[in-house]
Each structure stands twice: as C-alpha cells, then as structure tokens.
C-alpha cells in the first residue's frame, strides 16, 4: 500500500455548499503547496457529499469509505451533526478522524480517534465575554443568538465569561435559524437600552441583515457596543453593511487581514487559486487539518493506522497562518490564539483590525468537564 | 310522510332562492318539481340533501329532524340524489364506481384488510344495476371515456345503488336520447313502491306521463302543487313556464 | 371495422376485478431483484439499506398522495417522530430493542397522524398542501425548541440499537441493516398492497377522483381519510425508526422540510398511485445521487435536475408509468 | 354552384384510443342549416369537436370559407368565424356572467344588449360567478357566450337541454330568426329530432361513425320509418 | 409600537415582492411553479452583475432584472412549460424542482457559492427620523414599491379584459381556445409577467436576505405561504396576506420572542383552517 486515502465528508451541495467549498479549497491549497506525497505515501482524497446537515448520510458515507473505498483517514465535517454521526464508525473502524470545522465542544469526546483543527464556540466567546468586561469596561449586555446548538453554546459561553468577570446580562433572545428579518428582536434590544449587545448568527446572509437592522435602530458603536463572533463581519457582510459596520467588535481564531508572512502567503495563494475569493474560517480549518495529517504521517513514517496517527497528533504544535496552534494531548482539541478585532477603516476600506490577542486558549467547557 | 320540509328558507346574499318551502313526499310518491330556470329547484334539492344549509326551516325524514345531519348520513338513512351536472369518478370504471357505492351502503368500504374481489355480492349487484340501465358493455371502461348520455346513466346508477327510500333526481334525462330516457324512467317507475321519487325535469312529456303530482317552483316559492292535468291547464304556470306550446 | 362501440369481450365482473389485483411475474422478479445487493454489491449494502428505508417512507406517502389524493409536504413529521421515538428511548432510557422500537414508533407516529388528520380533512388543494407543510415545519420547530429532549440540530448522542432477536448484530458492512430494512419494507408493502386492493382502496380512489361526490353516495369520506392518514403516518414512523436503528443517529434533519419534499419528488419520479413507483423512485433517485455525487460532489444536482425534467417530458406518469406504457404497447 | 361554407371530406377522427368517425363527408352552404341526429354515443359531439378543431382530424380534409383548416388550431378557426356551444356548457367558473360574455366577444350584431334581450335571466345574474348559476342559466350563458363572438357558422350541441319550455320556445324562435333572417349557418345536434328537423333545412343521421342517411329535414320529418330504424328516436307528437 | 407595525409591514412587503410573481403563475395560471425562486435568483444575479461589473445604478438594474427573468421564462415556457399546463400538478412539481436544481448548479458554476452583496445608493441606506422614530429608508422604499406593483397589477389583471382572458384560459383551456382566445400567447405573456415579477422581487430582496445559489429553494416556503394565505390569484389578497403575515410575525416576535419561529407557521395553519381559500381567494 503506497497510498493513504483520506475520505473528505462535506456538504458540497445544499445550503452549506459554500462552507464545503471554502474548506475544500483550503485542503486543495495545502496539497498544492506541499505536494501529494508524504512519508513516501501518495495522498488520495475521496470527496463525499452529504447534501446538508445529514447525520445519517454522513455516517453511511463514512461506512462506505471504510468498507468500500478502503479509506485510512476520515476528514471534513463542516457540520456538527455529521461529525456526531460518524463518531461510531471512527471507533469501530479505528480511523483517524479530523474535524476540520464542526465547532460544538463535546463532539470530540465521542471518539478517541478524533482531533479538531478548527475552533470551538466556547473557546472564542468565553474569552470575548471576559475581555468585554475586563478590557472594554462594559458592565451590562444583551445577547441575541440564533436558536440552534451553536447559538446556544455561544450564548452560554459569552454569558459565562461576561458574568464571571462581573458583568450583567440584561436579557437574551434567540432568533429562528432561518430568520430573514430581525427588526422585532432588535427593537427588544433597543427597549432595554443596553451598553452592549452580543450577536451570534451563522455566516451567509444573516450577518449583514442583522447588522443593518441594528444600525437602523441607532444601535451602533460607539453609543452601543456590538460584540459578535467573527462571522458577523466576514468580507461580504462588511461590503454589504458598508459604513454601518464600523466599530463592531468580534472574536475569532482567524483574521484574514492579520499581517503575518505566513498568513499573507496563505491569503495570496488562496486568492490566486480561487478567483480572488478570500479564505475564511472553513478554509483555514481545512488547511490546518491537512497540515496535521501530513505532519502526523511524517511522524508515524507513513503508518496510517488510527492508533498510530492519533498518538502522533496529540500534542502536535505548529505555526499556522492563523497564528500558533496546537493539539491538546488530553482532549485532542485545538489550542490557539483568540483575536479580538474591531471593524476599522484601513486605506479607505473597512476591515477587521486586531485590537487584542489572547494566546493559548483552550476550550473552556472541556477544561471544566474533564 | 317519508320526507317533509317545513318552511325552508335560503338566500344567497340578497337573492332569495328558497322562500318558505313546505312540501310533503309520501311513500311511493312520483312527484315532479318544475319551474323556470333559476327558480331554485336544484338549490332546494341541495338543501334537502345537505349540500347547503337552510337559513331557517326544518327537514324531516321519516319523522326525524335531519336539518343538522350531514349529507353522507342522510344518504345512509335513505335520502339520495343525482346531480344535474355530472359529478362522477372520471378515472374509475362504472363497475368500480357502483361497487364503491354498494360497499359504502353495506358498511364494507372501510375494510382495508379484505380484497375488493372478495366482495362478490357487491360487485354482482352493481353489475346488475348497470345492466339494467344498459351500461353493461361499458361497465369496465373508464367513466371519462363514455359519451355524455352514458355518463348521465352512470349518475343514476350511483344513486340507485344506495337503495334509497327517497330519490331526488335532478334532470336525470338531460342529454339522454328519447328512447333511452323513456327506459330510464321506466326503471325509475318500476322501483319498489315504497321508494318516494322527486324529479326535476324540463321535458313536459316525461313529467306528465310519470308524475302523479307536480310541484311548481317559481322564484324560490311554491306556486302550486297539483296533478299534471291541473298544472297543464293553470294559466300562471303557462305564463311563467310552459309557454304556448303545451296544451 | 369501426371501433367506437367495440368494447372488451364481456368478462365476468368479479373476475375482471380480481385480475387487476393478481400478483404478476414482474412483481415476483422485482422482489427477487432486491436480493441482488447481497451477492453482487456487498459494498453498497449500507446504501441499499438507506434506499429501502426511504422507499418505505415514499410508500407511506404514496398511500395518501397516490391513492387518497392528499398532497403532503409535511410527512417528515411522522418519519421524524418515529426516528426520535426510538432514538430517545435508547439514548435517554437505555432501551434499544429494535422490534419493539418499531412498534412503538408506529404507535407514536400513528397517534400523531390520527390527531393531525382532524385538521387535514378539513382542507383541500393548496390549502391542504400548505397545512401539511405548516404542521411539518411546526413540528420541526418544536423539535428545535425541545432541544433538551431531542438534542436539537446537533442530534442525539449515545443511541445504541441492540442485536435483532438478541442475535444479529448491526455490522459495519450493513448486512444486518439491509436485511432488516428490506424485511420491514416488504412486510409494510404487503400491508399497503392489501389496503389498496381492498374496498377501502377503492374508496380512496373515489376520494381522489371526486371528493364532492363522496358524501352523496353515503360515504363518510373524512373517516376514510383519517384512517389512511393514520396508517400512512404509522408506516412513515416505522421508516424513521429504521433509520435511527440502522445508523444510531438522529438529528432534527429527520423532521425537515427537505426530507418531506425529497420523498415527494422521489415518489412522483417513480410514479404515484402504484406502490412500486415509490420504491422505484427511491431506488433511482438515491442511486443516481450516490453515483453522480461520487463523480462530482459539487454539481451532481445538475444531473438530477435534468433527470427530473427529462422524466416529466417523456414519462409524464413517472418512470413506472412510462414503463407500463411501453409494456402495454408491446402487448 | 358556389363553394360550400364548410366542407368535410372523408374525415376520420377520434380519440387516442378510439376512432369515432370515419369517412364522414358533410358540406353546408352559407345560410344553410343542418341537423345532426343519431343515437347516444355515436359521435355527434365528436363531429362538432372535429369541426372546431379540439378533436384531431386523422385523415381527410376540412375546408371553411374556401380555406383548408384541417391543421388549424381551434382559436384560428374561431377567428375565421366558427362558433361552438359545448354540450356540457363548460362555463368559466372563475369569471362572472358578464366576463364570460365579454371575454371572447368580437364586434358584430351580437353584443351584451342583444344577448341580454334574448336571455333576460342572464342580465339579472350578471354579477354571479360562472359556477353559481343554475343549470339552465349555464346553458343560456354557453349559447350567449358563443353568440358574442359573432360567428358565421354556429355549432350547437344540444342547446335546448335543461331549458324551461318557455325558454325553449323563445330560443328556437331566435335560432330560426338567425337562420332565416340573418343568414347564419347552423349545425345543430339535438336529441329532440322533431325540434331539430323543424329548425333546419337538411339533416344527417350518424350511425356507427358513418353518415347513414342524409335528407332534407322536412322529408325526414315525415319519414318516421327511417328515423325509427336509424336513430331509434320516438318522435314526440306535439 | 408604531415602529413594530412599520417593521412588520416592511417585512410583509419583502414577502410580497418575493411572492407576487407566484401569485400570477401559481395563483392565476394554476401552475405549480416551484422554480419561482429560481427566476427570483436570476433577477438577483442580473442586478448584482450589472451593479458590480458594469457599475449600473441600483434603480436601473431593477427593470433589467424583470426583463431578464421574463425573457428566460418565455423561452422556457415555449419549450417546456406549455406542455405542462395540463400535465397535472405533480408533473409541474417535479419539473420545476428539477429546474431549481439546474438553476442552482448554474448559479454555482457562474457565480460561486458565496454571498453576493450589493451596495445601495446612499439615499436608500440608513434611516429617516420622524417624530423621534427611525424608519429604515430601504423599508420605506419596499413599501412604496409594493404599493405601486399592487396597484398596477390590480388594474391590469382584475380590471381589464386581459385578466379575464387569463382566468378563462386557465379555467378551461379548450373552450377558451374554441372561442378564439390565443391561449398559448396569453399563457406565455402571463408566465413572463409572473417570472419577471419574480426577478424583480429577487433583485429587491438581495439587500435584506442576501443572494447565493440556494436562494431558489430558500424562500420557497415563505412565498408559498404568502400566496396561499392571500388567496389564489388575488393580487390584493397577496398584498393583504403578506402585510398580515409580516405584521403578525414581527409583532409576535416582539411580544413573545419564544414563539418566534413558530409564529408564521401558526398563522398559516390558523388562517387556512378558518379560510381554506385564503383571505381574498375565491377558489
Ligand atoms: N375523451 C374520450 N376518450 C375516448 N373516447 C371518447 C372520449 N369522448 C368520447 N369518447 C367516445 O366516443 C364516442 C362518441 O362520443 P360522443 O360524445 O361524440 O357521442 P354523442 O353522439 O355526442 O353522444 P351523446 O348523445 O351522448 O352526447 C363514444 O363511444 C365515447 O365513448
Ligand atoms: N352559490 C350561489 N351563489 C349565488 N347565487 C347562486 C348560487 N347558487 C345558485 N345561485 C342562484 O340561485 C338561483 C337558483 O338556482 P338553482 O340552481 O336552484 O336553479 P334551478 O331551479 O335548478 O334552475 P335550472 O332549471 O336552470 O337548473 C339561480 O338564479 C342561481 O344563479
Ligand atoms: Mg337546476
Ligand atoms: Mg354528445
């Protein structure tokens, strides 16, 4: 056997196709840069489409990858439920499984063969909650999150950090996942007139919509601070929001504009390969996921068995375009720098400017539960 | 009296289509209901059978008040009608359609565990009804492919299959050629004497030869109830309905 | 020479009706063909199992859509209820016995079907479609709101299904999964076949053909509709339960509009009102999807879309309808 | 002699699964009126449907006003001046009575006033939706609707069905006026053979898809034997 | 509370512009056009392309969005749809779903899977303050546009003979044809009108709901809700239905946020159970 087969399970079609594409582009970029052989083995990617959040399909695809295609490594997983669906298979088939995006904390507990190279929601938001009180001096806030798993996680971890540092939450609302109009919720926020509002919505069209709704009501920095996870100010959303985005503060593990040679090279390469489209959190998750696989294979000398790879992956640390990162040897989860950014004008263009860095952040829930 | 209505009233908006209609239908009745177009004849039948609810008044079947009873229940109690404008099952064959009616009547239609073919008596009964109406040849063709006149006959077959006590026929012979409509009315006439029949018909020849009593409805109200001969001679009826030709 | 008056040679009516319901050689061959994956495509057994489950789901929809004329865009509601019933039973209460799970799922989904049938029979046409859609979406949102019970979008974890009869273990290859799904599918199919060939089935077709006439022939058609809707919901629940049991996962997606819509598409693709259409539709759609997605994970739906358009243009009664026409032409 | 207004030559037509008419040749001159008689299901309606173009002509030709219309679509034929009154009325349900009348109207002698004068009942019901009419009113509307297109050839499929005797009287008078005074050409399918024969100049009897008998109406009216044999119609003795 | 009503109305008008085209194709023509959203998407991409690539002003792109969708629909209508009018609703469902898939693939191929933001002219951005309440400018714009569309359509479709012709052709195609109506042309024009409106709606909606290849399916549920609640084929019905849904949804979310995601569906089911033909529907 001279090839190592990686089964890449992603929602290439359906509502999350964009996430899959961006992630896939990260994977491709890494392989272009580093070749498709490592430790004497040829790397072969087998792409499988789940068509949306489809746990049962993801699971079946993993099964097929194992029994039919003889895959050695399972990777991808843009969506939490799909990772959940596959955990059993990873266990039973003993396959090294790399979560390149799925961001719910506890999924990694489902299988000892899983590692994560993306981020967890508590990781960035707990830090933001603390920072908001301690550094930004905000005393009370209102939270507004999408009513689904990640949103709930975001709400609770931000609130946890925020209250632990001495802040008060004035109120929390949850918006329907597929919500085209935020005016009612924003009006509720306005009624309670908080110092700051914390937002979590999935990427796509909603960030711009909620951003505009806030500003239409006069809920805008500096009068009212807006905190959010990084999706809120992704490049397309920034463009659509325009001026109104100025001053929004977000927390994230990856910042496109971070001026760092590694990152600049990554962004340039990425744009060149993707019609000028910029990388995002999915891209970096895929990119680093491949890095981890390559490095682990080097370490095992090409041994692609799950047990060998997972041992190799534990404790691995490296410099990524996002900054320094490592794999926690105990939880197999990602440890990395969290960036607090503010939307500011640079060279006449609005972009996310890093105003604070918190190094070596672990997933706080894991810290607590383990 | 098998069927009695007491002061039935109904209006559509400002249009009064039934004013205070009280009629009685004894056992074995062969009554005709005539009147100008738009007089409210079909509406009256709709009211009796429950497709429409009266604004006021009562309907009694066998002495029991059925004003609030649903259509299906009225049919099960023996009050059946046919439609002026064909209301059939286009993709079912006449045989299937009539068998369905028989099964409903025998309360077998809900038996989802028994195959249709095992309801032998029902199928044979419906075939007999169709044969009686001269439809045996087309009984196994989809209803939609039958000529209009044949479809009219299927309409009657469906009604007969409910074994009604009171049969309300809304222009049953419209579109059926003369000789066949005569046959049709012979079938109706030869129904057991305990069935009461009320039929709407614009063909006076049929009315006068099959009806024992004629009810004349004009503008939603009963103008007159009388024997055919009396009706034929009544100047008011001639004026609004018959015209000069009949006499 | 002239054909207008010439009809089929007189046949005994009972025999004519019986002949319509007889098992044909095609049917026997069809079911034998379902065994092929065991011998020839063992690597596809997991797919085959999911196809069987989807086919069962489509079958339940055919019962209401193809026979009673109820176009539903919310049937995932019952599928999902079945799926969650066994999922919750296993993950929260530790009961993973499969057969009893199926019955429980059928019961729960059937009850929900019966309850909602009171609303369903009150409306027709677009309103009916929209009410089913609305109820389906409400159930989905309810599932989301009860995420403490359902696990929300992330899904339930910790489901484990026991061996069937304490003996057959669900293996990685899917031998057990497919055998189990196929047997359940076949049994439910037999049930459906009996139903549609009964006088009740005839009443359903009557409803589909002309609801307005039904009360005038003394039929309590709303009751018929309620019964068939309940049966259909129960079968959909069984399909959902199968999915949970064979995959040990269940997420909100089982309740989604997407699932409701997909199954209707598959059913129409195969051909409505003929039971086999449901199965053929699921088989073709899912195999095409799997193969096309294998070739190109990003654009497979282009080809599926073209397939659907093609079928409508050239086989307006679905694939089975088209085949039936070919066969008749041969005769 | 001038070319007839309408001429069917060896026409075969029917439905996908049954040929209904075969070798039918009929011609009607301008201003002439023709009765079509025959038993139930023999193809009378199909003949009219073939002329208006809803049923496809499989063989043979149809000429109208000197033009071959065999392959024309129904709307083109209608614009050339053929008007058809369907047997089953087929009122537009979601249009009001007045909209039913005006939706396809074309200028000419028949306008709203004229049809309302013919059927006062329709005027009373002008705001009703099409499906809220009584059967007879629908029949009137179907006739009036076609008249509003001011056709030069009128195809009537059992137009008297479901009408009160007094209306039948008025309508037959009107039809006679149209035929005799206004020179409208008429093809009338009617179960009441006597009425039909009194209204028309000539008659044909269809039998098993063929024209079994053709004769002047007056002659046929007295030839009860032929009628009885070919049509099975018992004539009213009115 | 005024602002909540205003926002509700504006949200309703967003639903209205998205669905008014479907009121024409589904409501009037009885054609189950699930590809409605695909035409909307087409209009959206036209606007994006014209604005981003060629720097057209937003307002000028709107008629283009209408025209492009209308033109494409005429071609499709001539080639495909006209064969489907009498093919039954299930075939229409299947075909148009197929078309949505193809459209999504096309959009992905040409524009990628990402969001396509547009930058509105400044007079449509931000808000206007009246009596201490801030009204979003774009929302005011949407309301005005919706009123204009409603008025125009109401007069062309319900007050002219053309509207009657459409309904006649839909009610009974063969009789309409036999009376001399050019049913094919009527259908083609109507279909183009409906699709054009879809395209316009898509273009107008980008600012609020964004645009990506899943647009075609994403709003299907909403537009179906509006059309059925308003009543098939009734333009004022759609308007009223959209306004009611919008206000109900926004006010409900404002007062009982926990019910947020249920509201619109609860309204749907409740309204249809009380009035199965929709608010102003006759069929
Ligand atoms: N759509 C159809 N498909 C197949 N066969 C049809 C169709 N319509 C009519 N037929 C058949 O064509 C034959 C002629 O029908 P048609 O309606 O022309 O008869 P008709 O003479 O007008 O009868 P009626 O006096 O009852 O109106 C009948 O045998 C009928 O069964
Ligand atoms: N749903 C309705 N809404 C308004 N008016 C209606 C409705 N249904 C019927 N009508 C009107 O009520 C009147 C009575 O109609 P009905 O059908 O009872 O007449 P009829 O006596 O049966 O006439 P015909 O002999 O022509 O069949 C008609 O003028 C009709 O237009
Ligand atoms: Mg009547
Ligand atoms: Mg006829």
Image (spheres, coloured by chain):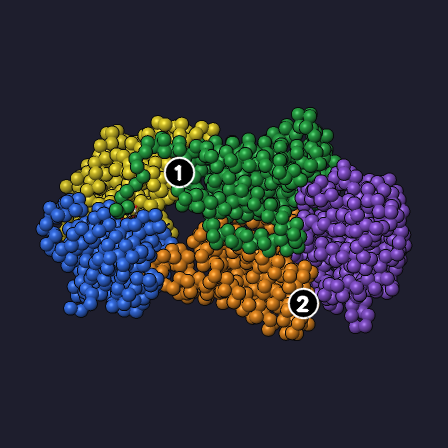
Quarter holding residue A199: bottom right
Mark carried by residue C215: 1
Q: Is residue A24 visible?
A: yes
The residue nearer to you, when weighing A181 against B175, is B175
Instruction: Please say if E32 is above or below C217.
Output: below
Colour of chain B as rendered: yellow
- Point out residue A164 in the picture as x, y percentages from the top left corner: 87, 48
Mark toward the viewer: 2 or 1: 2
Task: Spot the blue chain and give its letter.
Answer: D
- In this view, the residue in front, C228 or A299, is A299
Q: Is mark 2 within 8 Å of ligand 2?
A: no
Name chain E's colour: orange
Query: Which residue extends farthest top?
Result: C166
CA gap, disc 2 and disc 1:
57 Å
What's the residue at 51%, 31% (across, down)?
A: C191
Rendered location of residue C276, percent (x, y): 51, 39
Q: Colour of chain C?
A: green
Please say if C12 is above or below A50. Answer: above
In the picture, which quadrant includes the N terminus of chain D? Answer: bottom left
Determine whether the residue tagged by mark 1 lies in a helix, strand or loop: helix
Give whichever of C91, C179 is nearer the camera. C179
In this picture, residue C304 sits left or right of residue D183: right
Where residue D144 appears, x then y in whole percent? 28, 59
> Where, by quadrant of the figure, is residue E50 drawn?
bottom right
Q: Is residue C162 above or below residue A259?
A: above
The residue where tag 2 is placed is: E118
- In this view, the residue in front, A358 or B125, is B125
SS assignment at label 2: loop
* Cβ of mark 1 under 8 A from ligand 2: no
Chain A pictured colour: purple
**In this rendering, does residue E127 appear at all?**
no
């Amino acid at each position: 056997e001279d090839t190592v087969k990686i089964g890449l399970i992603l929602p290439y079609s359906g509502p999350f196709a964009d996430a899959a594409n961006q992630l896939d582009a990260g994977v491709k970029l890494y392989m272009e840069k580093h070749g498709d052989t490592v430790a004497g083995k040829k790397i072969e990617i087998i792409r499988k489409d789940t068509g949306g959040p489809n746990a049962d399909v993801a699971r079946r695809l993993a099964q097929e990858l194992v029994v039919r295609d003889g895959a050695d490594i399972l990777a991808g997983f843009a969506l939490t439920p799909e990772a959940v669906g596959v955990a059993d298979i990873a266990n039973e088939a003993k396959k090294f499984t790399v979560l390149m995006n799925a961001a719910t904390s506890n999924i990694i507990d489902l299988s000892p063969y899983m590692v994560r190279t993306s981020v967890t929601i508590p990781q960035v938001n707990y830090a933001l909650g603390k920072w908001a009180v301690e550094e930004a001096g905000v005393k009370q806030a209102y939270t507004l999150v999408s009513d689904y798993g990640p949103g709930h996680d975001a709400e609770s971890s931000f609130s946890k950090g925020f209250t632990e540092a001495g802040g008060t939450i004035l109120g929390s609302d949850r918006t329907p996942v597929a919500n085209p109009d935020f005016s009612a919720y924003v009006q509720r926020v306005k009624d309670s007139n908080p110092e700051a509002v914390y937002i979590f919505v999935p990427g796509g069209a909603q960030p711009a919509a909620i951003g505009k709704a806030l500003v239409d009501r006069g809920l805008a920095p500096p009068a009212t601070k807006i905190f959010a996870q990084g999706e809120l100010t992704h490049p397309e959303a920034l463009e659509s929001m325009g001026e109104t985005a100025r001053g929004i503060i977000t927390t994230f593990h990856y910042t496109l504009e971070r001026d760092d040679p590694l990152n600049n090279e990554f962004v340039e390469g990425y744009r060149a390969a993707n019609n000028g489209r910029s990388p995002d959190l999915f891209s970096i998750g895929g990119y680093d996921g491949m890095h981890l696989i390559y490095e682990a294979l080097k370490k095992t000398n090409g041994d692609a068995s799950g047990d060998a790879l997972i041992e190799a992956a534990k404790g691995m640390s490296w410099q990524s375009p996002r900054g320094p990162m490592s794999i926690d040897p105990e939880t197999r989860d990602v440890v990395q720098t969290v960036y607090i950014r503010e939307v500011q004008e640079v060279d006449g263009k609005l972009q996310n400017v890093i105003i604070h860095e918190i190094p070596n952040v672990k997933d706080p829930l894991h810290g607590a539960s383990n | 009296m098998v069927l009695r209505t007491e002061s039935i009233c109904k209006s559509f908006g400002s249009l009064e289509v039934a004013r205070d209609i009280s009629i009685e239908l004894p056992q074995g009745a062969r009554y005709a209901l005539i009147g100008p177009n738009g007089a409210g004849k079909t509406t009256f039948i709709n009211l009796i059978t429950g497709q429409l609810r009266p604004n006021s008044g009562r309907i009694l079947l066998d002495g029991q008040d059925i004003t609030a009873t649903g259509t299906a229940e009225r049919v099960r109690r023996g009050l059946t009608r046919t439609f002026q404008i064909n209301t059939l099952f286009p993709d079912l064959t006449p045989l299937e359609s009539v068998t369905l009616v028989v099964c409903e009547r025998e309360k077998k239609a809900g038996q989802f565990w028994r195959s249709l073919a095992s309801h032998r008596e029902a199928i044979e009964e419906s075939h007999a009804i169709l044969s009686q109406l001269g439809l045996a040849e087309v009984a196994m063709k989809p209803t939609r492919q039958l000529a209009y006149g044949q479809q009219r006959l299927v309409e009657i077959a469906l009604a007969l299959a409910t074994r009604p006590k009171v049969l309300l026929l809304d222009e049953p012979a419209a579109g059926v050629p003369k000789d066949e409509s005569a046959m049709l009315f012979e079938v109706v006439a030869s129904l057991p004497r305990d069935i009461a029949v009320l039929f709407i018909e614009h063909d006076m020849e049929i009315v006068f030869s099959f009806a024992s009593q004629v009810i004349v409805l004009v503008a939603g109200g009963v103008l007159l109830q009388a024997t055919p001969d009396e009706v034929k001679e009544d100047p008011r009826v001639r004026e609004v309905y018959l015209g000069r030709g009949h006499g | 020479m002239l054909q207008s008056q010439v009809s089929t040679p007189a046949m005994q009516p009972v025999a004519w009706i019986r002949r319509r319901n007889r098992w044909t050689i095609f049917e026997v061959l069809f079911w034998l063909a379902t065994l092929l994956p065991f011998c020839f495509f063992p690597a596809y057994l997991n797919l085959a199992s999911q196809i069987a489950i989807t086919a069962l789901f489509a079958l339940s929809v055919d019962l209401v859509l193809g026979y009673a004329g109820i176009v539903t865009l919310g049937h995932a509601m019952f599928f999902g209820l079945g799926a969650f019933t066994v999922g919750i039973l296993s993950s929260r209460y530790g009961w993973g016995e499969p057969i009893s799970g199926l019955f429980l799922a059928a019961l729960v989904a059937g009850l929900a079907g019966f309850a909602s049938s009171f609303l369903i029979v009150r409306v027709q046409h677009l309103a009916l479609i929209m009410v089913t859609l609305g109820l389906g979406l409400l159930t989905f949102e309810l599932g989301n709101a009860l995420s403490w019970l359902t696990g929300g979008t992330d899904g339930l974890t910790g489901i484990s299904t026991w061996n069937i009869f304490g003996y057959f273990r669900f293996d990685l290859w899917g031998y057990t999964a497919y055998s189990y799904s196929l047997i359940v599918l076949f049994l439910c199919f037999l049930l459906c076949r009996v139903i549609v060939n009964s006088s009740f089935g005839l009443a359903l077709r009557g409803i589909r053909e002309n609801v307005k006439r039904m009360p005038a022939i003394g039929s309590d058609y709303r009751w018929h509709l309620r019964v068939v809707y309940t049966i259909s919901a129960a079968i959909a629940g069984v399909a959902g339960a199968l999915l949970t049991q064979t995959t040990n996962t269940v997420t909100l997606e089982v309740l989604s509009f997407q699932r409701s819509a997909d199954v209707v598409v598959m059913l129409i693709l195969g051909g409505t009102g003929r039971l086999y259409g449901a199965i053929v539709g699921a088989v073709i759609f899912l195999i095409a999807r799997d193969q096309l997605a294998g070739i190109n994970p990003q654009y497979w739906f282009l080809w599926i879309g073209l397939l659907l358009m093609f079928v409508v243009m050239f086989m307006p009664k679905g694939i089975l309808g088209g085949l039936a026409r070919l066969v008749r032409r041969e005769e | 002699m001038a070319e007839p207004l309408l001429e069917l030559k060896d026409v075969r037509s029917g439905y996908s699964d049954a040929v209904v008419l075969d070798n039918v040749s009929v011609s009607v001159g301008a201003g002439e009126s023709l009765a079509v008689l025959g038993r139930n299901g023999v193809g009378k309606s199909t003949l009219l449907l073939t002329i208006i173009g809803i049923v496809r002509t499989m063989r043979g030709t149809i000429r109208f006003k000197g033009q071959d219309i065999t392959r024309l679509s129904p709307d083109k034929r209608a614009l050339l001046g053929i008007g058809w009154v369907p047997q089953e009325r087929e009122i537009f349900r979601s249009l009001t009575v007045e909209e039913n009348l005006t939706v396809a109207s074309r200028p000419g002698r028949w306008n709203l006033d004229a049809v309302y004068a013919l059927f006062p009942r329709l005027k009373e019901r002008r705001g009703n939706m099409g499906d809220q009419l009584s059967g007879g009113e629908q029949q009137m509307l179907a006739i009036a609707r076609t008249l509003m297109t001011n056709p030069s050839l009128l195809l009537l499929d059992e137009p008297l069905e479901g009408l009160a005797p007094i209306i039948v009287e008025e309508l037959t008078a009107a039809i006679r006026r149209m035929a005799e005074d206004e020179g409208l050409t008429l093809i009338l399918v009617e179960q009441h053979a006597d009425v039909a024969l009194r209204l028309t100049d000539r008659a044909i009897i269809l039998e098993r898809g063929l024209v079994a008998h053709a004769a002047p109406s007056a002659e046929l009216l007295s030839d009860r034997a032929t009628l009885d044999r070919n049509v099975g119609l018992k004539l009213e003795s009115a | 509370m005024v602002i909540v009503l205003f926002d509700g109305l504006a949200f309703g008008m967003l639903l209205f512009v998205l669905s008014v085209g479907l009121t024409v194709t589904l409501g009037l023509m009885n054609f189950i056009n699930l590809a409605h959203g695909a035409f909307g998407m087409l209009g959206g991409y036209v606007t994006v392309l014209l604005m981003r690539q060629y720097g057209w002003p937003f307002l000028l792109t709107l008629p283009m969005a209408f025209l492009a969708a209308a033109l494409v629909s005429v071609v499709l209508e001539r080639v495909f749809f006209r064969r489907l009018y009498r093919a039954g609703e299930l075939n229409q469902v299947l075909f148009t779903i197929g078309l949505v898939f193809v459209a999504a693939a096309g959009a992905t191929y040409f524009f990628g899977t990402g969001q396509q933001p547009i930058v509105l002219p400044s007079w449509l951005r931000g808000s206007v303050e009246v009596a201490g309440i801030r009204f979003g400018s774009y929302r005011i714009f949407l309301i005005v546009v919706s009123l204009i569309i409603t008025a125009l359509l109401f007069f062309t479709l319900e007050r002219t003979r053309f509207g009657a012709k459409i309904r006649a052709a839909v009610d009974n195609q063969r009789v309409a044809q036999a009376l001399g109506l050019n049913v094919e042309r009527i259908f083609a024009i109507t279909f183009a009108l409906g699709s054009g409106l879809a395209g316009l709606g898509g273009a107008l909606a980008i600012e609020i709901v964004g645009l990506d290849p899943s647009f075609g399916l994403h709003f299907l549920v909403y537009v179906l809700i509006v059309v059925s609640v308003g009543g098939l084929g009734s333009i004022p019905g759609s308007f009223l239905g959209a306004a009611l849904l919008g206000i109900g949804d926004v006010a409900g979310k404002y007062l009982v946020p926990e019910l947020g995601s249920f509201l619109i569906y609860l309204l749907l089911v409740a309204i249809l159970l009380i009035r199965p033909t929709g608010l102003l529907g006759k069929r």
